[in-house]
Image (cartoon, rainbow, N blue to C red):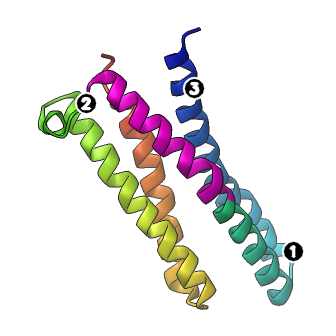
Amino acid sequence: MTWWAVVRFLHVLAAALWVGGQLTVSLVVLPLARRQLDDRLRAQMLTAVGRRFGVITAAVFLPVQLATGVAIALHKGVTWDSLAEPGYGRILAAKLLLFCAVMVAAALHGWASGAGRRALARALAISSLIGSIGVILLATALPVT
C-alpha cells in the first residue's frame, strides 16, 4: 500500500461518513423521531443531532476532505487551467463546484434550523443531501489517470 492509497482512502472514508451520516439522519433518525417523539422532545433531539453532526463535519470531515483533495490534486498535477479540459478536468471542476454548493446549502440549513425556519431548513437539507450524492457520483465518474 502506498502513501497515496492511504490519502485516497481517507478522502473516500470522510466522504462516505459524511454522506452516510446525512442519509442515516434523513432515512432513519428523522422518520423515527417524527413517529415516536412529541414535538418538544423531537425538536431537542434533532437540534442536538444536527449540532453534533455539524461539529464533526467542521472539525473532521471537511478538513480531511479539503486536505486530502488538495493533496490528490497536486499529486495528479491538476492546475486551474486543467479544470477546463475535457474529461478529468471538467468532471473534477463540476465536482468541486457542486461540493461548494453543498457546503453553502449545509451552512444555510444550520442557520435556518436555528432560526426556526423549518420549511427552508428541510428544503436546504434535501438540497444538501442530493448535492452530496451528486458529488459522490461525479467522484466515481472521474477517469483513472
**Which sits in the foreground, 47 or 137?**
47
Distance from the alpha carbon under mark 1 to that under mark 3: 38 Å
Residue 75 lies in the magenta stretch: yes
Label 2, secondary structure: give it: loop
Task: Name the amino acid type tagged 2.
Answer: Val
Q: Earlier in the sequence, mark 1 or mark 3?
A: 3
Q: Residue at x 43, y 37 (%)?
A: 69
Q: Amino acid at mark 3?
A: Phe
Q: Residue at x 80, y 67 (%)?
A: 32
Q: Position of residue 2 (x, y in %)?
A: 54, 10
SS at circle 3: helix
Write the residue at 76% across / 83% down.
43
Say which label, 1 or 2, has the lower sequence index: 1
The residue stretch that appears in magenta: 56-78
- List x then y, in percent, for residue 39: 80, 88
Query: In the displayed structure, does residue 66 sit left or right of residue 33?
Result: left
Q: Please give the residue where the numbered disc 2 appears in the rendered image.
A: 78
Q: Quadrant of residue 76?
A: top left
Q: Which residue is mark 3?
A: 9
